[in-house]
């Protein structure tokens, strides 16, 4: 009698577990906007969530350690005049986040390490170039301050955030609404999906479609695509009968899929979160109450089902922690931040191991916070793989990295070369902005102290009147 051979993989026993109740973030009014983005972005320092806000768009930024009930008056990041549709942390500066809105603008914000007293209302820079809502944001994985935005005008714009300049505008490639955009590992190519049902591989610096596949999934509902470590494209979409489907494609041969699997008949769009270090893709459907995960390998059937994490509550959105933010001492290989209607709940994926030692097979060197290129180097045609770091000693996020203004680059966090120069005229606006912010905070604190003192005086007067009355 033949024995069934079980596929060898160190990830066969990955299991998910929701964090304890006291590790969740409670009383957050998660946005109800109808839009298929994750509504949540997270890095090793902060958790950002798009929230309900009257009279415009807003998101909340919480230090990771600030778990429990969130005060209803906790300061928000406000500035957009329409709903916020997408947010994304800069991979090279944990204090910088970009937001995209229905109001057609993209704003870039500097988040302080301390908790602000009032709402943050002044972005570092506002990027205006789209004529309709902006629903997709993605920072370049290796070049400093390069940000991609995609709008309802079917245009992709690539910005140098440091100067506010448009580096590239891809405005004649997509005939309809863009559903997703993803960089490859070194940022030389883009994978996009569009309402016209076409999956495209684009060289953005040549404004050229390198390869395309019509109807990678035959259904009309939105498709998503991400690059894998081996350069393949992993997609999620729908069949003609509205069943959810996943696919794996080789851009050098788009005729036939490497793998194609039907899943279920739910109608929520599957958001894929891909971890290149382990080559595991996690599928989170909006409105689902589960996370399914698969390992992608170069052996048939290429996309191997691992397991499903199930819970009772449906998810409104999902944040995915970069690898450098995980707890390597607990063999944690992924952490999600699941949005409920009124809270955010961490979900931890671990590989069970008996040893307490660092598991180097689970944690290869991973992209760190240093960029490999400057924006103009990338634009000129240079490519570079991400600068990797080891997680053996654990990762400690750097302290607040203050913005330095130069005429070329307002997000340059490196000290200028050569001898220390005196403050130039181009640095004055940032200094002025910082001083004004500090003065406003001092004024707000004084007003609060004054209000408390007036309250104390009133209570003392009441006490005196009561004492006089009893006499």
Image (tube, grey):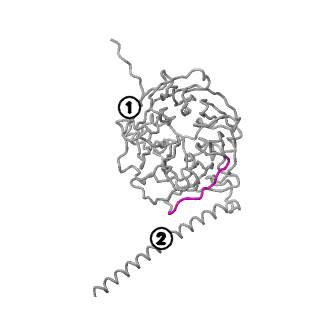
User: Where residue 69 appears, x then y in whole percent?
Assistant: 39, 55
Q: Residue at x 63, y 31 (%)?
A: 201
Q: Which residue is tagged 2?
A: 448
Checking the image for residue 123, the label placed there is: none
- Asked which secondary structure carries label 1, the reply is loop
- Comparing 413 with 138, the one in front is 138
127 to 7, vertically: above or below:
below
- Comparing 133 with 253, the one in front is 133
263 to 421, vertically: above or below:
above
Mark 1: few/some/many CA within 10 Å (<14, 14-19, 20+): few
Q: Which residue is drawn at 50% across and 63% down?
A: 117
Quarter of image, res 14:
top left
User: Where residue 72 appears, x then y in whole percent?
Assistant: 44, 58
Q: Which residue is tagged 1?
A: 13
Range of residues picked out in magenta:
117-130
Mark 2: few/some/many CA within 10 Å (<14, 14-19, 20+): few
User: Where residue 63 appears, x then y in whole percent?
Assistant: 46, 53
Per the image, is 387 magenta?
no
Q: Residue at x 52, y 43 (%)?
A: 34
Farthest residue toward the bottom? 471
- Measure the C-alpha gap from mark 2 to mark 1: 54 Å
Q: Which of marks 2 and 1 is nearer the N terminus?
A: 1
Q: In which quarter of the image is the C terminus?
A: bottom left
Quarter of image, res 405:
bottom right
- Asked which secondary structure carries label 2, the reply is helix
- Residue 178 as seen in the image, left or right of residue 333: right
- Comparing 94 with 24, the one in front is 24
Q: Residue at x 63, y 46 (%)?
A: 144
């Amino acid at each position: 009698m033949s024995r069934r051979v079980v596929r060898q993989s160190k990830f066969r026993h990955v299991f998910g577990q929701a964090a304890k109740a006291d590790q969740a973030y409670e009383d957050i009014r998660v946005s109800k906007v109808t839009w298929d983005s994750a509504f949540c972005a997270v890095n090793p320092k902060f958790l950002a969530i798009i929230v309900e806000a009257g009279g415009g768009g807003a998101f909340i930024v919480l230090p990771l350690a600030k778990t429990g009930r969130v005060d209803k008056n906790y300061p928000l990041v406000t500035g957009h005049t329409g709903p916020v549709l997408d947010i994304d942390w800069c991979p090279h500066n944990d204090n910088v986040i970009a937001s995209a809105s229905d109001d057609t603008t993209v704003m870039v914000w500097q988040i302080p390490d301390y908790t602000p007293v009032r709402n943050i209302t002044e972005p570092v820079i506002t990027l205006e170039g789209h004529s309709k809502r902006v629903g997709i944001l993605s920072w370049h994985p290796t070049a400093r301050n390069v940000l991609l935005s995609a709008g309802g005008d079917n245009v992709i714009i690539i910005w140098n955030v440091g100067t506010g300049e448009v580096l590239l505008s891809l405005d004649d490639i997509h005939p309809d609404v863009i559903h997703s955009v993803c960089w490859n590992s070194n940022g030389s190519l883009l994978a996009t999906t569009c309402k016209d049902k076409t999956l495209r591989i684009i060289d953005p610096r040549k404004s050229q479609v390198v390869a395309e596949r019509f109807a990678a999934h035959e259904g009309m509902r939105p498709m998503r695509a991400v690059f894998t470590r081996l350069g393949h494209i992993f997609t999620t979409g729908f069949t003609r009968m509205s069943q959810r489907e996943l696919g794996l494609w080789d851009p050098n041969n788009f005729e036939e899929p490497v793998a194609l699997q039907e899943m279920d008949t739910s109608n929520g769009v599957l958001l894929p979160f891909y971890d290149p270090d382990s080559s595991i893709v996690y599928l989170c459907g909006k409105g689902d109450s589960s996370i399914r995960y698969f390992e992608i390998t170069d052996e048939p059937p290429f996309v191997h089902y691992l397991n499903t994490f199930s819970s009772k509550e449906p998810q409104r959105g999902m944040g995915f922690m970069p690898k450098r933010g995980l707890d390597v001492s607990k063999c944690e290989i992924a952490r999600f931040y699941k949005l409920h209607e009124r809270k955010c709940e961490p979900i931890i994926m671990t590989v069970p191991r008996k040893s307490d030692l660092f598991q180097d097979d689970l944690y290869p060197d991973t992209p760190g916070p240093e960029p490999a290129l400057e924006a103009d180097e990338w634009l000129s045609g240079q490519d570079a793989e991400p600068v990797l770091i080891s997680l053996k000693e654990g990762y400690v996020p750097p302290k607040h990295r203050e913005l330095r203004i130069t005429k070329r680059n307002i997000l340059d966090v490196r000290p200028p070369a050569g001898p220390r120069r005196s403050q130039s005229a181009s640095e004055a606006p940032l200094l002025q902005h910082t001083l004004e912010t500090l003065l406003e905070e001092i004024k707000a604190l004084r007003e609060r102290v004054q209000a408390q003192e007036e309250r104390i005086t009133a209570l003392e007067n009441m006490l005196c009147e009561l004492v006089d009355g009893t006499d």
